[in-house]
Amino acid sequence: MTTPSPSPAPSTPPPAAQSPAAEALVAHDLWHQFQPNWWVLRGVELTFRAGELVGLVGPNGTGKTTLIRLLAGQAAPSRGQVTLGGRPLSKIGRLELARQIGYLPQNVRSSFRLTAEEVVAQGRYPHQRGLGLLDARDHAVIRRVMDETRTLAFARRQIEDLSGGERQRVLLASVLAQEAPFLMLDEPTSMLDIHHQVEVFQHIRRLARRGLGVLVITHDLNLAAHYCDRLVMMFEGKVEAEGAPEAVMREAVLRKVYETELIVDRNPVTGSPMVVLLGNREEEREDRRWPC
């Protein structure tokens, strides 16, 4: 499937240049627990650099969301630290951090009735001064990111009236409006149809080519293998495998972490690794014993 690349309006300013201070986002020996003796993360060491799209993959409950929240500065680790350009996130003010790292969580709830455009405008908050009024550049950025995410058509509609997929694209546009050099996206395609899933991955890959560092959680291994420069496979709170998609998407690794029969083949068109699920053989044998 191919999707035409969106083109911003001529009057729209280009994305802000990457800050030289945000050269790398680094996790230093991260440990995190929610209850005594229940460690969600155990000694995670990772480095994310500007200009790359990294896919954070792995089964449910392996610490992916916790890790991305710590990397975005949304919570502090129980042990270890995260640094941005060599500075601990704990030493960076909230507004400055929001100008450096954009974060899209899995679930966003609002108690206010806002239009899609008003939700996107909230992404400009870290850049506002004085009375917090939007200026011409703010409006231009809002229009650009809504154009890029195909959300201009429902800019004036209430966010509660949109479909799950439309709402997800609006929230992505709001994060893009921050113009941060690093983006942390927690399952941004979870509610999207296949057309918009591909469109989102194409767009975030373009952002990486512009110099942004993008970390995305996804359960679609085939999309991740096709679009991501690097994959990080989480398992039981640790990094099980890390590297190019070809290095991570190996049958032994995937069978271990997903406990599922599968094979890894090559996409006949793109050449990227492709997972083919075979199912659970024990369950299939039981199904044959007990036909409906």
Image: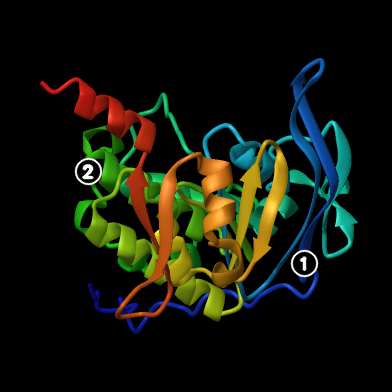
- Residue 61 lies, in percent from the top left, at 58, 31
Residue underneath mark 2: 157
Instruction: Give the position of the C terminus as an image quadrant.
Output: top left
Identify the amino acid type marked 2.
Arg
Percent position of residue 214, x then y: 58, 63
Q: Is residue 78 above or below residue 10?
A: above
Q: Nearer the viewer, residue 22 or 79?
A: 79
Outermost residue, top side: 36
In the image, 177: left or right of 155? right
Residue at 19% across / 20% down in the picture?
Answer: 290
Residue depicted at x 32% and y 58% = 197
Q: Please name the residue that numbered disc 1 is placed on.
A: 24
Foreground residue among 268 and 7: 268
Q: Is residue 139 visible?
A: no
Query: Which element carries disc 1, helix, strand or loop?
Result: strand
Relative to 22, 212 lies left or right: left
